[in-house]
Image (cartoon, rainbow, N blue to C red):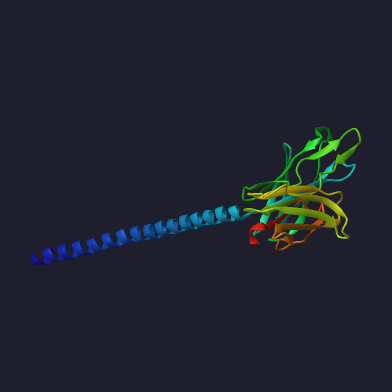
């Protein structure tokens, strides 16, 4: 009788060990799978956060210009961000053009040239990146005149922005040789920022912008001025900005 009970006890122990072994053989892989799933999830969350952060960093200067007496628009871009930017689409009005151009930080390159329907006459250009940002051409809308068969040239200009709390200013825009192109003087003391835009006659040349503040009965150059501005459209924007701080003197 004792022998039978002893065998039953051994069987119970063996059964328990087998059950525990089966349990662990199922539990351990399940835990590993769950940990792997958590790891994959965390990796995807991290990748999404990085992508969102890099999307916010994107800064693309887009320039679009036509080829004279032609039905082609060329799109050029400069990566002004700290991350590489991949251009995947170029919109010209409602026409979507697929492309593939990667620009490293600080790089400038022609994205591509695209044929357009000249009967539309007005063309707006936008560039889409792989991260989902959309950048509009800083050269503005392009216009085609069907009567002359030529494209209208964008207005070339220099925009001067003076950070100001209180003061009287004068601004001169001139060629390198001193020939004056534009002049502006405030009528009195200004109590806010001073913004003035000067149209310039030609591209491919340099202009000197002199900004002065009236102080102690004299005109004094603002720090950082005179400043030389290069107008390089269509290889750059037709509108160039010049900033000066009038609060420093």
Q: Tell me residue 202's x, y (percent).
A: 87, 50
- Total numbered circles: 0
Q: Establish if 13 lies above or below 174.
A: below
Name the side, left or right, on which 44 lies relative to 177: left
Choose between 193 and 150: the one closer to the eye.
Answer: 193
Choose between 163 and 165: the one closer to the eye.
Answer: 165
Q: Quadrant of residue 30?
A: bottom left
Q: Residue furthest left?
A: 1
Q: Residue at x 75, y 53 (%)?
A: 170
Q: Tell me residue 80's x, y (percent).
A: 68, 57
Q: Establish if 98 lies above or below 204.
A: above
Q: Which quadrant: the C terminus?
A: bottom right
Name the side, left or right, on which 132 lies relative to 91: left
Q: Tell me residue 225's x, y (percent).
A: 74, 61
Can residue 238 be seen here? The reply is no
Q: Tell me residue 194's x, y (percent).
A: 68, 50
Choose between 148 and 107: the one closer to the eye.
Answer: 148
Q: Which quadrant: the N terminus?
A: bottom left
Name the side, left or right, on which 132 lies relative to 35: right
Q: Residue furthest right?
A: 148
Q: Residue at x 32, y 61 (%)?
A: 24
């Amino acid at each position: 009788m004792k022998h039978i009970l002893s065998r039953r006890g051994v069987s119970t122990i063996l059964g328990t060990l087998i059950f525990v072994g089966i349990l662990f053989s199922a539990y351990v892989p399940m835990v590993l799978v769950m940990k792997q799933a958590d790891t994959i999830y965390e990796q995807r969350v991290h990748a999404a956060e990085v992508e969102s952060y890099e999307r916010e960093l994107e800064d693309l200067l887009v320039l679009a210009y036509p080829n004279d007496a032609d039905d082609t628009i060329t799109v050029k871009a400069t990566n002004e961000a700290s991350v590489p930017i991949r251009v995947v689409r170029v919109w010209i009005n409602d026409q979507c053009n697929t492309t593939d151009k990667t620009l490293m930080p600080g790089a400038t390159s022609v994205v591509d040239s695209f044929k357009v329907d000249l009967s539309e006459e007005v063309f707006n250009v936008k560039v889409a990146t792989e991260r989902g940002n959309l950048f509009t051409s800083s050269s503005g809308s392009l216009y085609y005149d069907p009567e002359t068969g030529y494209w209208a040239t964008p207005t070339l200009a220099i925009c001067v922005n003076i950070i100001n709390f209180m003061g009287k200013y004068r601004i001169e825009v001139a060629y390198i040789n001193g020939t004056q192109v534009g002049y502006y003087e405030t009528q009195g003391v200004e109590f806010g920022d001073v913004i003035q835009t000067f149209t310039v006659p030609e591209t491919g040349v340099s202009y000197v912008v002199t900004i002065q503040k009236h102080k102690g009965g004299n005109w004094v150059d603002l720090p950082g001025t005179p400043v030389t501005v290069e107008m390089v459209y269509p290889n750059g924007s037709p509108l160039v900005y010049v900033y000066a701080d009038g609060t420093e003197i």
